[in-house]
């Protein structure tokens, strides 16, 4: 399992008092955090796992969760800080921006972007998915980041295949794999694995690969801490310009589908507004703001 102390060291200093529990295998880190909410645990409770047997994302969609990725869920209590319940959905956009900042720091030219409302993409596909659930007076945020490519790549629903941080990261960053697990056999990019030492002969994550996951987790918690503070102070309006600067959908024609799959709106994406809504412009020039649903690129 990952080392909670190593994650804490990589995250420090933070305003949120993080307390991390790490598991080799669990049903779902989201479910673990929700169990902690039921016990009344404080803001900052974190659960990570190397493997999930029942992971899920936004709208309850099931996630295949093999070893190699970072599965992390976080308990926050924004209502206790005076945030209105109607503003909670914009927290997922703030978290997506936090993830973006971390993953973009691993590569200067991978084209890391945020896709409204809850994904982080790069030029090769989907790097991360995010879920947000309100439970009692708390929020459970689930984050899944593809770091090392597993032997069997899970199929993803939607328009984007999986992308992996190891394939886009600068090799110098992945040289964090040290000792006998060092990336002495690192291969050039261009579709090759960045580090063949991520898994041992038995298919288990190497010690060095776990240290990379710990580093990513720590950076993530630090980034969430920074943007959560800004969001608490100024709402999503304080982050909207930064979000739009990294938005994948801007300028693209999209359809907005409802929960049952019906397309309820079409148009060109103009921006994401201060309330976290996706603003579309139709063929006649009229704009409409979409507060919920999933935006699909029309190819």
Image (cartoon, rainbow, N blue to C red):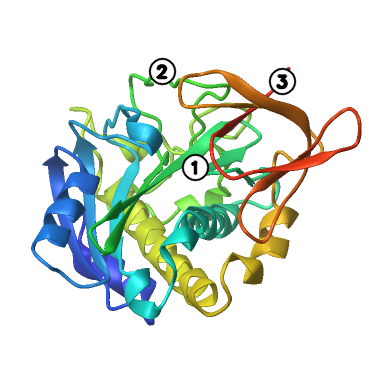
- Gap in Å between the C-alphas at discs 1 and 3? 26 Å
> Looking at this view, is 204 or 84 the one in front?
84
Asked where in the image residue 237 lies, by quadrant, the reply is bottom right
Q: Report helix, strand or loop for mark 1.
A: helix
Q: Report helix, strand or loop for mark 3.
A: loop
Q: Residue at x 54, y 54 (%)?
A: 93
In the depicted structure, whether residue 245 falls above or below residue 270: below
In the depicted structure, whether residue 154 falls above or below residue 200: above
Asked where in the image residue 288 lies, by quadrant, the reply is top right
Percent of width and height locating residue 292: 54, 41
Left or right: 37, with 162 as reference point: left
Q: Nearer the viewer, mark 1 or mark 2?
A: 2
Left or right: 110, with 5 as reference point: right
Q: Nearer the viewer, mark 1 or mark 3?
A: 3
- Gap in Å between the C-alphas at discs 2 and 3? 21 Å
Q: Which residue is mark 1?
A: 165
> Looking at this view, is 112 or 181 the one in front?
112
In the rendered structure, find residue 298 and report the number of the disc placed on it.
Answer: 3
Within 10 Å of the Cα at label 3, are there few (<14), some (14-19), or many (20+) other Cα atoms?
few
Percent of width and height locating residue 65: 28, 32
Left or right: 151, with 46 as reference point: right
Asked whether residue 1 is in view, the answer is no
Q: Residue at x 56, y 70 (%)?
A: 235
């Amino acid at each position: 399992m990952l080392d909670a102390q190593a994650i804490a060291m990589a995250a420090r200093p933070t305003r949120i008092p993080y307390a991390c529990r790490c598991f080799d295998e669990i049903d779902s880190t989201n479910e673990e955090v929700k169990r902690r909410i039921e016990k009344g645990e404080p803001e900052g409770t974190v659960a990570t796992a190397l493997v999930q047997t029942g992971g899920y994302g936004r709208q309850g969609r099931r996630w295949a969760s093999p070893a190699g990725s970072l599965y992390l869920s976080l308990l926050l209590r924004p209502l206790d800080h005076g945030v209105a319940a109607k503003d909670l959905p914009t927290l997922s956009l703030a978290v997506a921006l936090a993830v973006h900042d971390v993953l973009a720091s691993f590569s200067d030219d991978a084209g890391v972007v945020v896709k409204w409302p809850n994904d982080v993409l790069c030029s090769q596909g989907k790097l991360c998915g995010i879920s947000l659930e309100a439970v009692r007076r708390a929020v459970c945020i689930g984050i899944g980041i593809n770091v090392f490519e597993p032997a069997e790549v899970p199929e993803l629903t939607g328009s984007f295949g999986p992308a992996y941080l190891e394939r886009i990261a600068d090799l110098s960053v992945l040289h964090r794999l040290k000792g006998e697990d060092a990336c002495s056999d690192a291969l050039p990019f261009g579709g090759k694995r960045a580090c063949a030492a991520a898994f041992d002969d038995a298919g288990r994550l190497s010690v060095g690969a776990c240290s990379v996951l710990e580093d990513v987790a720590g950076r993530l918690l630090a980034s969430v801490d920074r943007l959560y503070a800004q969001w608490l102070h100024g709402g999503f309006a304080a982050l909207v310009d930064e979000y739009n600067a990294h938005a994948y959908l801007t300028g693209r024609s999209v359809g907005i589908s409802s929960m049952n799959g019906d397309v309820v709106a079409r148009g060109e994406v103009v921006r994401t507004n201060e309330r976290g809504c996706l603003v579309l412009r139709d063929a006649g020039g009229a704009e409409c703001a979409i507060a919920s649903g999933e935006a699909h690129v029309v190819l």
